[in-house]
Image (cartoon, helix red, strand yellow):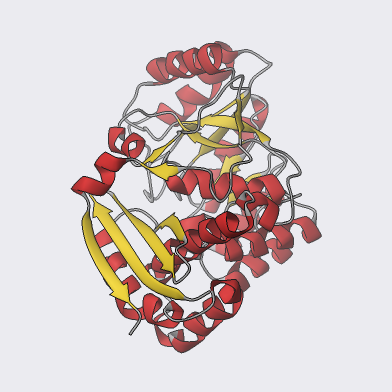
Amino acid sequence: MKIIRIETLMAPKQAVVRVYTDNGLEGIGQTAMRNEDITVSILHRMVAPAFLGQDPWDLQVLIRKTLKKHYKFTGTFLYRALCGVETALWDLLGKATEQPVYRLFGGAIRTEIPMYASSLSRTITPEQEAQRMKDMVDTHGFRCVKIKIGGRMNQDIDEWPGRTEQIIPLMREALGDDIDISADANSAFSAHHAIKVGRLMEQYRYFHFEEPCPFDEIENTALVADALDIPVAGGEQDNSLQHIKRMIERRAVDIIQPDVGYIGGPSRLRRVTEMADMAGIPCTPHCPNSTLLQLFTLHVVAAAPACYQYQEWRTDDNQPWSKEIYEPMLEVVDGKVKLSDRPGWGVVLQPEYVKKAEIHVSQAD
């Protein structure tokens, strides 16, 4: 079995990948989101040539060879492109063996996965956010929610004065004691200010404190984690496995949060889950969208011992295009997502998506 064709199907906001073999199998994947035109260019120029003509079962070898060849260019776009090809190949291998991908990852520890309702909005008022999250809890059965605090990469400047100090107690008052609440600062604070905010969150029994300091300031994040009892989370921006290893070993974070698209695909994501398992800390992958990337993430989660906490489910309904890519769509029932046992990722592309997408092809000679 050899890989003979790699296609990208680019539409606004995302790029889907299809891989074909000489025995008629097809697999579907997706690159990381944003600037997909750049990612697609990198995919066809730097990633596809390493895979064409090769046996898809040599996937791990091909990933290593690709990264070794382009060692001077191991930036975010290479990893984003690699995710697209790798995820398509896992789908193809699942279909070849008539198994869901999570079984290829070692088997399901869990196929019903608890989710937390994740807000991506800072412009919403605290009162509106509290009501919106209460509605999500009542409608979908979420037992955990996450809100935004501070200002993204904003050096201790809030979205507007006092918002963080207002929303933290208000959410607890609105949701009561039985719902877990987390907060994401998106690199908003200096270490000292983050500690002050973290102590307020501890007062109101919050579940975790995400990315309190600029994500590349490991030492400052470690200062916050050392000072607080509330678990500190981070790691979504990072694609270096050695960098993540140092974060875990230093206990700069108490929860590690790699993103399947940013880190380069499920294989490298799984290596992070194994690091977390060995270190005895939870892994909660970052995934704030409902595209195929959510599906890939949950298949890894299903097979990973370290992924035992709530996983991320975006609540903002401002990505209608994300529901036009594949079917059947995942859904939250009683606060959980249930994975199917259909082969591969267990889904197909929607015909309308394929019709409107701009297709680029790399083909074996």
> Considering only vertical position in the picture, is 200 above or below 281?
above
Residue 223 placement: quadrant: bottom right
Horizontal side of 97 relative to 169 (left or right) equals right
x, y (%) of residue 308? 72, 41
**In the rendered image, which quarter contains the C terminus?**
bottom left
Report the label total. 0
Query: Residue drawn 56% across and 51% down?
Result: 344
Residue 119 placement: quadrant: top left
Query: Residue drawn 57% across and 73% down?
Result: 59
Horizontal side of 228 relative to 289 (left or right) equals right
Horizontal side of 56 relative to 278 (left or right) equals left
In-front residue for pair 330/270 = 330
In-front residue for pair 296/264 = 296
From this viewpoint, is residue 35 visible?
no
x, y (%) of residue 360? 24, 66
Horizontal side of 314 relative to 257 (left or right) equals left
Name the residue at the front extreme: 23
> Considering only vertical position in the picture, is 280 above or below 108?
below
Query: Residue drawn 78% across and 59% down?
Result: 279
> Considering only vertical position in the picture, is 277 above or below 142?
below
In-front residue for pair 239/101 = 101
Query: Residue drawn 19% across and 47% down?
Result: 356
x, y (%) of residue 118? 49, 32
From this viewpoint, is residue 78 visible?
yes
x, y (%) of residue 230? 68, 39
